Image (cartoon, rainbow, N blue to C red):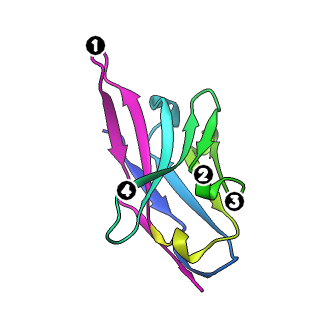
Amino acid sequence: QVQLVESGGGLVQAGGSLRLSCAASRSIFYFTEMNWYRQAPGKQRELVAVLTTGGSTNYLYSVKGRFTISRDNAKNTVYLQMNSLKPDDSAVYYCNGRRPIPGSMRNEDTWGQGTQVTVSS
């Protein structure tokens, strides 16, 4: 079973930066997508950034130009660089690995435990 472990969260002032890391217990190419989600209190979990095995990326509109998802294949690690942080970015951030279940139309999701990001105004 693959495990994902996030790190790098914390408290930062508005305008500051943080880099989140997601370390996988095996090659990240086990997944067809590596994603970052976030969930703020009282809100639904939302998809923040996507990185496919082919290297394509996509971002939530509100973080475009501020957040960058990347990977280090040798370290089996995916990163989320977050710049120009705003109080609205405060949430628990979750790493997600997704792959299709062979013979079905469904995906298998693996989640990390989450890391808290708090942006003060």
Q: Locate residue 67: give its quadrant.
A: bottom right
Callout 1, which amino acid? Gly
Query: Label 3 belongs to which residue?
Result: 66
Which numbered tag is attached to residue 103? 1
* Residue 1 part of the magenta-drawn span: no
Q: CA distance from mark 3 to mark 2?
A: 10 Å
| Crowd class of label 3 (few under 14; some 14 to 19; many from 20; radius 10 Å) | few
* Pair 3/2: label in front: 2
Between marks 1 and 2, how big is the CA–CA gap? 33 Å
Nearer mark to the viewer, of 3 and 1: 3
What secondary structure do most residues of the magenta stretch adopt? strand
The residue singled out by tag 2 in the image is: 61
Crowding around mark 1 (Cα neighbors within 10 Å: few <14, some 14 to 19, many 20+) is few
Q: Which residues are magenta?
A: 92-121
Query: What residue do we see at 54% from left, 69% from top?
Result: 89
Badge 2 marks a residue whose secondary structure is: helix
Crowding at label 2, few (<14), some or many (≥20) Cα neighbours within 10 Å?
few
User: Considering only order in the chain, which callout, 1 or 3, is on the residue closer to the N terminus?
Assistant: 3
Q: x, y (%) of residue 29?
A: 51, 30
| Disc nearest the viewer among 4 and 2 | 2
Residue in the foreground of this view, choosing between 27 and 96: 96
